Amino acid sequence: MSELRDLLVHTAHQIADHREATATMRVFPAVEPASLRTGFSGPLSAGPTAAAAVIEDLVAAAGPGLVATTGPRYFGFVIGGALNAATAADLLTTGWDQPAYNAVSAPAAAVVEEVSGAWLKELLGLPAAASFGFVTGAQAANTVGLAAARHYVLRAAGHDVERDGLAGAPRVRIVANAERHATIDRSLRLLGFGSALLEEVATDDDGAIDTEALRSVLASQPPGPTIVVVQAGNVNTGACDDLAAAVEVAHAHGAWVHVDGAFGLWAAASPSTRHLVTGIEGADSWGCDGHKWLNVPYDSGYVFCAHPDAHAAAMAYTAAYLALPGVDAVRGPGDYVPESSRRARGFATWAALRELGRDGVADLVAGCCALARRFADQLDVAEGVEVVNDVVLNQVLVRFGRGSDAERDATTDRVIAAVQRTGECWMGATTWHGMRLMRISVSNWSTTEADVDRSVAAILSCCTA
Ligand SMILES: *Cc1c(COP(=O)(O)O)cnc(C)c1O
């Protein structure tokens, strides 16, 4: 075998070894950053090192610090696993190394996005005519959606923001769910909207926007350039805003509606949860992740826009050296994203969608929700354990202990730390409505009922310890 072939085969084995081990290894490694640092550090060598030796050193240095995020008992943040075909397609993407800017730079990468984008719209119940971009994640998707919104509402007010910037522009109102994801604020910051501009709308007990409050916030000023940000999937509770009502109220006021649906948009893909996002198709832009619930490897998000011209006006650029013959034969992926050169993200998404099929995506969503309810049902009946959210999707919030709020907060933090130390499973923590809580997210295709039961046992053993 050639040296390269040897190296790639060896690397593939390393990947397979790691992925097989995630079902049995400690979910979070018992390692100190200082010891990881030792593995990676040393002076930068002046001369070359053989590729095989570099990879051997990398595996040795990184191995002790790897988290079993692709494994079945990782329930932190909202971290999906990585489907087998999607993982292999992502390895091919690296090997092929196609710059997915347009049909001239990477024809296959451009076409696979064209096809996968249409499949995604169908699965998510979005308008077939919507434009889309394959971005790094929901942070980027929200930024692009809000950039399209900025273009659209300012153009309607007679201002060309791409040409003239925000200086001298009419004031844009930004109205958002008070429990929006923090990335919305960063997107607004990047777009030149100060955080002081944000008008927050109160929510109901589970963190979904209060439609009447939205109506009165909007009505407090006459119609003008306005962007309303709502969400499908509250990052703590999983609650989905009433999209049909929010869209109706916002559109009556002439506002653009952006939906942050990083993981919650996938509710649309299963008959069991579709009702949570009724009215989704009426919004103006949507952000969604592939690397969370669709279980595509990291670096995968999608933005969709009901106004393709506004989307392209906000994002596209060209240069003489890019406008080559044949460039218009395929939709230009680079016209809908903020990056210029970038990874050919469509291959992994195409592979995930093919691996699962429409029914498989629906089953993945319904299955994770059922497992989240299994967590909730088993934990809520235990002594000194309380599930505090309405488990409508894949998120569960758990409070531990007895006594005062402060005592319960302290017990909750202690239990979470103890569970993390067991290595049996990994759940994060959050503060929501003034309470310290364990936050469980079920987002991995490979999690089974047995994994939930084993994790519940680990949690309950930490309560009594
Ligand atoms: C995770 C998340 C984001 C940010 O997504 P990234 O993929 O981390 O960029 C935005 N909104 C919500 C609701 C999320 O859950």
Image (tube, rainbow, N blue to C red):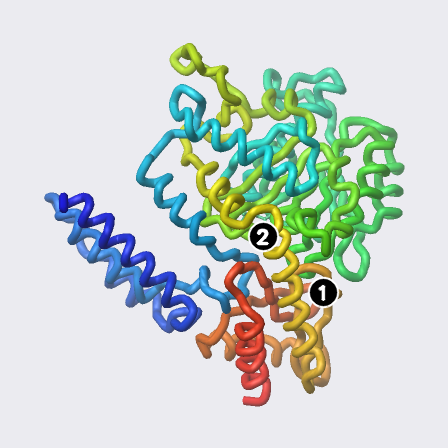
Query: For the residue carrying disc 2, how many other residues have a C-alpha within 10 Å: few (<14), some (14-19), or many (20+)?
Result: some
- Name the image quarter holding the C terminus: bottom right
Most extreme residue toward the bottom is: 465
Q: Nearer the viewer, residue 116 or 293?
A: 116
Whether pointer 1 and pointer 2 mark residues with C-beta atoms closer than 8 Å, the reply is no
Asked which secondary structure carries label 1, the reply is loop
Residue at x 66%, y 78% (from the top left corner):
379
Q: Amino acid at mark 1?
A: Val
What is the number of the mark on residue 391? 1
What is the number of the mark on residue 232? none
- CB at mark 1 closer than 8 A to ligand 1? no
Residue at x 87%, y 32% (from the top left corner):
252
Asked which secondary structure carries label 2, the reply is helix
**In the visual, does 21 lie left or right of 400?**
left
Residue 281 placement: quadrant: top right
What is the number of the mark on residue 360? 2
Q: Amino acid at mark 2?
A: Gly
Disc number lying in front (1 or 2): 2
Q: Is residue 415 visible?
A: no
Which of the two discs, 1 and 2, labels the residue nearer the N terminus? 2
Q: Position of residue 442 (x, y in %)?
A: 59, 63
